[in-house]
Image (cartoon, rainbow, N blue to C red):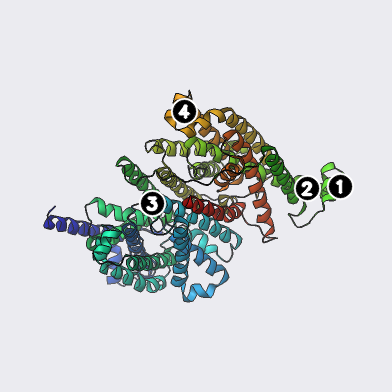
Amino acid sequence: MSVPRQCLRELGMIGAGVMALVAAFALNMAHGEARIGVGDIIRSFAYNDDLLRDVVSGFRLPRATIGVLAGSAFAVSGALMQSIQRNPMVSPDILGISAGSFFFIALATIFAPALIVFMPIAVAVCGGLVAVLMVYLLAGGFRATPLRILLAGLIVAMTISSITGALLLLYESEARFLITWSAGSLRQNGWSNVQLVWPWIVLCLIAAFTLSRAYDIARLGEDTARSLGQKHALLVTATLIVVLVLTGASVAATGPIGFVGLVAPHLVKLAGVRRHAALIPAAALWGSSLLLAADSITYMLGSLTSAPPVGAITAALGAPWLLWLVLRRSRGGQMNAASSLDFGRAGHVSPTILLLTLLLLIGLTLLAGLMFVGGLPLSGMQVMQALSGKAAPLMQKIVWDMRGPRILAACLAGAGFALAGALFQAALRNPLADSSIVGVNGGATAGILLMVALFPAASATGIGMAALAGGMLAAATVYILAWRTRLTPTFLILIGISVSALCGAFVQILVMQTRFTDNPMVWLIGGLYGANWSTVQILFPTLLAGFICAMLVATKLELLSLGDITARSLGAAIAPVRLAAGATGVTVAAICVSQTGPVGYVGLLAPHLARFLCGHSLRAVLPVSVLVGALLLGLADIAARLVIAPGELPAGSVIALIGAPYLIYLIRRSMRT
């Protein structure tokens, strides 16, 4: 391509970006509680309409300005990360930087409000730095494969978001404005945020543009760049600083907003823009336009109190884009996902001893849940008397009606999530598959909230059916799309992220536009708050039926580990077996979600622990996984109620705190094998 033609293409994209930004800016200024035309805005200043001028200058103009700044910052951050990592799938939100920044802001808001007043950007930057260090430490450094980067970012973002959700729930009064802001918001009350962040964002954008030539050279590869005299490590460090400040400043002003940093750079690249001298300003223009347009859409969907957060709209727009991008690159054979993850050899524990030990530990867990959890500690003798009906009525009520069903429900739900995870991992031949990765948790959550929004008095059966329908729809979508990529781990995870993000956007819109009788945040994090004997009556038969179905297909499912061709030659009906295992896993996981909320990590960790303890035979892994999952969630629920008693953490957050370090250990271990 000739240089003049390339320059014309770049100038055309920048010019189109300017026009798109002007249109998006005008559209955003016109929308709010009352629609105001652009002509009215101009006349308000010309004819001294004080009320209208105050609305425009005090609320709408700052909102649109912060949208331009934040959109530019997120988009340029994504472009820089994609260039320096040579990985088209990364962005600040996928790498967990946005989640880390918001987590530190939440921490400071609750425990050190003075820091938010005097140095909010520094707090956000520190949070982003911690998150990105965790990602690269987990993934193996800057030379990590795209699969490991994506896995690490997913794990870090999931963990941090879960802990942040728990903080917002526990300290609702201190952080009440953060709950709605946690999904992103451009609403401003004056110019204070704009004055705070604009110098940092503009300075970093100028720094990024100054390094344009260096990014063009870095795109040729690290070795080539070094041969041309570039100090690659210095460039990576400078880029990381720029990205952290851009993301931190934006999150401090708007909250975490996802997908802008992924979509905007790709829009520009699809137009043929490659040189960073044009890519950076074009990405900034289109990122601002996208964010302002998304914010305008929120006002079309509801009023000030019921409008969905702008982060939900960007997710709804960006997730399909990521999905398309994944499928496009899979067809092109790019981003090879053949990397395997070996989590170590199995142990050599006698099956009988192992099962008896796990049953004993579960029994002790149940006893601990009956004795120590609650405002009135009980002795073992008191518990036994209550169970046998010989204790006082108050003791029997505590044991039978309050503590007993909850600890039983925790163990049953943990067993169900573990069983589903083991089935998904075996059916998909992917050691990282579980109900959250393949979209079941997100789909079930969306189905439940839609049912409750439409029918507030819905029965437990209706909620369970809604969870099942949502989980099956999400899992089927992920499975069908991932089948085209041969179910390779990278693409399966990315497709799962996309579908989960779509479900999450739908949930956020529902939460903002529906008045639920209870705080949905309590349920969305995952926990056993409302568990009773009805919960046990639903979970027990589900687990029993699911376990029987799993054991019936276990022998044929084991053949899939040899590969489809070998399994077919040995007489296995691959499609029916995989469908039966997947349907069983989806059913069990969806019904568990309907009772406990989307508890993550259990279905991912329990099968790995089971294989480590008993070997790789699925007929042994399934029962051990069930027992390990019961033990994990049972202990997590006890810890959730004891750590900050008389307060209570969500069990999902405790599992994240337990599961993330163990998963980090597994992945780091696999890198040494």
Disc 1 and disc 4: Cα gap in Å? 58 Å
Q: Which residue is mark 1?
A: 391
Badge number at residue 567: 4
Q: Which residue is mark 2?
A: 399
Question: Which numbered disc, 2 or 4, marks the residue that appears first in the sequence?
Answer: 2
Question: Which numbered disc, 4 or 3, marks the residue that appears first in the sequence?
Answer: 3
Q: How many labels were placed on the picture? A: 4
Q: x, y percentage for residue 217?
A: 25, 61
Question: Which numbered disc, 3 or 1, marks the residue that appears first in the sequence?
Answer: 3
Instruction: Name the foreground residue: 71 vs 31.
Output: 71
Q: Secondary structure at mark 3?
A: helix
Question: Residues at badges 1 and 4 in contact (C-beta under 8 Å)?
Answer: no
Question: Which numbered disc, 2 or 1, marks the residue that appears first in the sequence?
Answer: 1
Question: Residues at badges 4 and 3 in contact (C-beta under 8 Å)?
Answer: no
Does residue 307 appear in this view? Answer: no
Does residue 81 appear in this view? Answer: yes
Badge number at residue 146: 3
Task: Rate crowding at label 1 as few (under 14), some (14 to 19) or many (20 or more) other CA atoms within 10 Å.
Answer: some
**Callout 3 amino acid:** Pro
**Callout 1 amino acid:** Ala
Question: Residues at badges 2 and 1 in contact (C-beta under 8 Å)?
Answer: yes
Instruction: Name the foreground residue: 491 vs 311.
Output: 491
| Placement of 582 over or under 493, stated as above or below | above
User: Which corner quadrant of the image does residue 584 belong to?
Assistant: top right
**Callout 4 amino acid:** Ala
Judged by depth in the image, the label closer to the viewer, 3 or 2, is 3
Question: Residues at badges 2 and 4 in contact (C-beta under 8 Å)?
Answer: no
| Placement of 657 over or under 536, stated as above or below | below
Disc 3 and disc 1: Cα gap in Å? 60 Å
Q: x, y percentage for residue 185?
A: 43, 60
